Amino acid sequence: MIEPEVAAFYDACVAAPAADAPRIALAAFLDQRGESWGAFIRAQLALTHALRRGDQRDANPHRREADALLRGHSAEWDGGVGKIARVAAFSRGLVEKIALDTSTYLARAEELHKRAPIRMLVLSGLERLDELLADPHLDQLVSLSIGSGGIKLGDDGLAKLVACSRLGHLRELDVSFQDIGMSGLEALCASPHLRSLAYVGFAGNNIPLPAESAGTDWATGDYDLNGLTFPELGKQLETRYGELAWLHPLTRLPHCPPSYLEL
């Protein structure tokens, strides 16, 4: 749990989830107290900035430093989120990504968003989709993933989801294996709210993948962009709906799929 002396600095970070400045202030205060959490925050901030630049060589030492500093401190620094969520992952020094079932999330959303600056959500079980889409905290999400277990979104569910104006800051959406067909895909393309999307996970649905693809280099595992292809379906969608950045993740993102640490 967060100590009372640290709470004001921590709460400022929770109140501005996307901002670096409150985290830098928190790190400086922790440094004054001789606490390693400050160094961890600074290491993860540097890691995120390197990943956003696509500079893997610079990212690696920051990743190693952050991983070493976090060891044994996760429960101490997670604001108590780890006792609620199945997964509580740190980014820029604080918990930003959680995974849990939708019912637990809805029951404890207010508490979770007071405990941590949550920006990435992995949910399973969508029996309460309408309640989820009414959650006011969705407006701070940059990533939303729907798990493959339980009730599928289908075309109607995806149409509801992409009509939610609270999701306007999403950079990543994963709706793989959700029984989605052409009408759901077209609803996604037509949505006026998801114009910031840079990546969509769409594997295992009822139609071919519409985004560009490429093979990988056998030695490095990196995508070989010399063999880049853009499916006819993707071309047709852009003819109808205009340019869609998420159909071009390989040529526009530093990493594909993006690491949650860079979002």
Image (cartoon, rainbow, N blue to C red):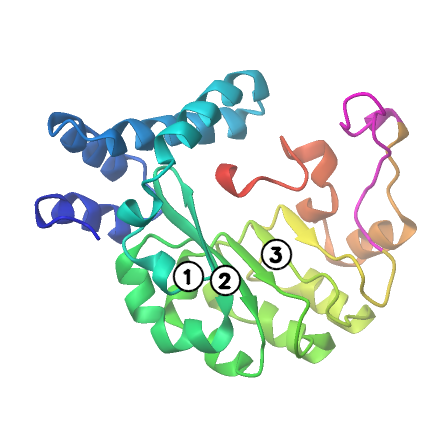
Horizontally, residue 25 falls left or right of residue 98, namely left
> Looking at the image, which is closer to me, 41 or 53?
41
Measured as percent of width and height from the top left, residue 41 is found at 32, 33
> Which element is circle 2 on?
helix
Instruction: Inspect the image, locate mark 2, and give the three-letter code of the amino acid beneath it.
Output: Leu
- Answer with mark 3 or mark 1, whichever residue precedes in sequence: 1
In the figure, residue 116 lies in which quadrant?
bottom left
Residue at the left extreme of this rendering: 5
Task: Tell which tag, 3 or 1, sits nearer the viewer.
Answer: 3
Label 1: how many residues lie within 10 Å, few (<14), some (14-19) or many (20+)? some
Whole-number angstrom distance, CA of label 3 to CA of label 1: 14 Å
Horizontally, residue 237 falls left or right of residue 131, namely right
> Which element is circle 3 on?
strand
Measured as percent of width and height from the top left, residue 193 is found at 55, 62
- Are the two marked residues, 2 and 3, in contact with CB atoms closer than 8 angstroms? no
> Which element is circle 1 on?
helix
> In this picture, which residue range is highlighted in magenta?
209-226
Label 3: how many residues lie within 10 Å, few (<14), some (14-19) or many (20+)? many
Reading the image, the residue beneath label 2 is: 167
**Residue 16 visible in the shown view:** no
Q: Which mark is residue 139?
A: 1
Measured as percent of width and height from the top left, residue 65 is found at 41, 23
Reading the image, the residue beneath label 3 is: 173
- Answer with mark 2 or mark 3, whichever residue precedes in sequence: 2
Q: Magenta includes 132?
A: no
Q: Magenta includes 218?
A: yes
Image point (38%, 30%), residue name: 45
